[in-house]
Image (cartoon, rainbow, N blue to C red):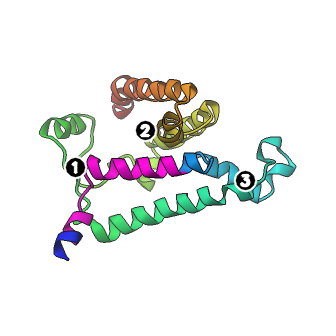
């Protein structure tokens, strides 16, 4: 029993998690569904009556209940894994990553899952925090809508379904991520 608990409380290796994700994706394709977390916002807006004022939200949302349940399962799974299966919240980082983060102004890199200098209520009221959290959140939402889906929808579901637009979107996600990481964030953290 202790071996099972030890296995569950550690990050699963790719050769376990990968096939499980593949089984989920094959099941979705066989049942004619596509996976994407951002589509849940459209479903929730339709549930509360968004279709009366906007054609985009006017669809049969009852066919998407499974996706809402899936998203709820992701949140609950994350809470359970963090609360009961994680021995601590410290993140193992390499020495060079710790040095790079300290140079950007992160005092205790790896002490928490996310740097508290950026992801906290106090930082929201600073220029740096506002740009990262509010402006960055807006850009993510805009990009998700403009690209017709989020990273999980395109990278997992779209690529599994061999969709060319998803391949183009995923390439764009990586280029954008590298651009922001190396050219934008260093200047933003110096504010």
Please tell me how crowded label 3 is: few (under 14), some (14-19), or many (20+) other residues with Cα within 10 Å: some
Q: In terms of secondary structure, where does tag 2 sit?
A: helix
* Residue 150 in view here: yes
Pointer 3 residue: 45
Looking at the rendering, the stretch of residues picked out in magenta corresponds to 5-27
Pointer 1 residue: 108
N-terminal of the two: label 2 or label 3? Answer: 3
**What label sits on residue 140 in the rendered view?**
none
Find residue 130 and report its horizontal and vertical position in percent: 49, 42
Please tell me how crowded label 2 is: few (under 14), some (14-19), or many (20+) other residues with Cα within 10 Å: some
Q: Nearer the viewer, mark 2 or mark 1?
A: 1
N-terminal of the two: label 2 or label 1? Answer: 1
Q: Which residue is rendered at x = 24% and y = 38% of the image?
A: 101
Looking at the image, which residue sits at the far left?
95
**What label sits on residue 128 in the rendered view?**
2
N-terminal of the two: label 3 or label 1? Answer: 3
Find residue 186 and report its horizontal and vertical position in percent: 33, 28
Nearer to us in this view, 65 or 115: 65
Please tell me whether residue 122 is drawn above or below residue 152 in the rendered image.
below
């Amino acid at each position: 029993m202790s071996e099972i608990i030890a296995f569950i409380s550690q990050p699963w290796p790719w050769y376990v998690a990968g096939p499980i994700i593949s089984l989920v994706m094959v099941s979705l394709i066989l049942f004619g569904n596509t996976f994407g977390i951002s589509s849940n916002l459209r479903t929730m807006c339709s549930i509360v009556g968004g279709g009366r004022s906007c054609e985009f939200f006017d669809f049969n949302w009852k066919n998407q209940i499974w996706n809402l349940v899936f998203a709820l399962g992701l949140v609950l799974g994350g809470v359970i894994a963090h609360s009961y299966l994680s021995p601590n919240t410290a993140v193992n980082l390499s020495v060079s990553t710790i040095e790079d983060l300290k140079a950007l102004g992160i005092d205790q890199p790896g002490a928490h899952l996310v740097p508290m200098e950026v992801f906290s209520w106090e930082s929201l009221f600073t220029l740096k925090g506002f740009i990262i959290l509010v402006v960055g959140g807006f850009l993510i939402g805009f990009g998700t809508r403009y690209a017709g889906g989020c990273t999980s929808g395109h990278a997992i579901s779209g690529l599994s379904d061999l969709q060319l637009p998803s391949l183009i979107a995923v390439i764009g996600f990586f280029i954008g991520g590298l651009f922001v990481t190396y050219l934008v964030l260093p200047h933003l953290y110096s504010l």
